[in-house]
Image (tube, rainbow, N blue to C red):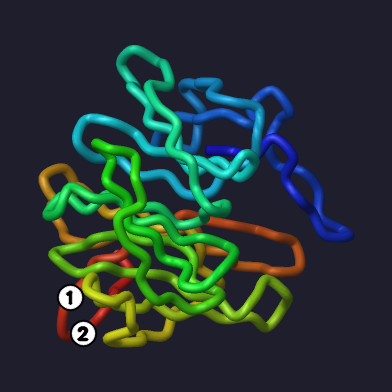
Amino acid sequence: MTNERPGYREGQTPKLAPNLRGKLLTVNRKGTVVDAMPLTEQDYGGIAYGGGYLYVAVQEPAEILQVDLKARKVLAHFAMSGPAGGLEYDRDRDLLYAMLYVGYPHLAVIDPKTHETVGMLWSDEGEMGLAKVDGELLCTWTSGWDPGSFSELRVLSTADGHVIRRLPLQGVHSSLSPLDAKVSGIKGFMSLVTTNSATGATVIQRYRYYHDVGPETH
């Protein structure tokens, strides 16, 4: 997902053409955009896929969209108490996790069948992307976006949201997405990584994940 009105610091310049903003982009491994699907002309938070549907967090109004990719249409709108960043579908429990930007606690648990928030878990300010990998709920945390900022990978409890483990990461990590082990052959995740906070240079990095060791660049 790309924002309709992306924010830039002084000295930074847009990298994406205006006609590709505010859309769901399909990008091949060379970085070429092969499809652009409009959903709503708003800014977005996290995205997640599960149960045959794509889920997209919209900032204003604060809601989650349920999208049928084959039909290329929005099927439902889930109202939220605040805008969400990280979003993940828990296939083991058939639930959505949404990391809210405002209020405490931040981590909402949503039933995608009823569209209702069925629980709120503890979370820390600065927690960003979410990914369920090999039975563990992972989350990126960042200290900020200014030069010198840093990130952690956190393992969260699905019972109460508290941090079980903290692992250091190189660079500022934000969005997460679990890898499909059947396709990639590994258990792990992809993450957006800001490699230069001054210019905003960002890459997609792939990681293999080990329970006892943590992430390994792959």
Mark pair 2, 1: CA separation: 5 Å
Quarter of the view holding residue 16:
top right
Which amino acid type is marked by label 2? Val
Q: Residues within 10 Å of mark 1 (few under 14, many from 20)?
A: few
- Relative to 167, say whether 178 is above or below: above
Q: Which residue position is annotated with label 2?
A: 213
Q: Position of residue 13 (x, y in %)?
A: 81, 48
**Side of 39 relative to 120 (left or right):** right
Q: Secondary structure at mark 2?
A: loop
Above or below — where is 171 with respect to 130? below
* Residue 22 at x, y percent in the picture: 63, 31
Which residue: 56% across, 71% down?
172
Viewer-proximal residue, 142 or 11? 142
State the SS at label 1: strand
Tell me what residue is drawn at x 11 percent, y 45 percent: 182
Q: Is residue 190 visible?
A: no
Q: Amino acid at mark 1?
A: Tyr
Q: Is residue 191 visible?
A: yes
Q: In the picture, residue 119 is in which quadrant?
A: bottom left
169 or 158: which is nearer to us? 158
Q: For residue 148, which numbered disc appears in the image?
A: none
Front-most of 197 and 85? Answer: 85
Residue where numbered disc 1 is placed: 210
The reply to whether dot 2 and dot 1 touch (C-beta < 8 Å) is yes
Q: Residue at x 24, y 66 (%)?
A: 208
Image-based side of 172 in relation to 115, left or right: right
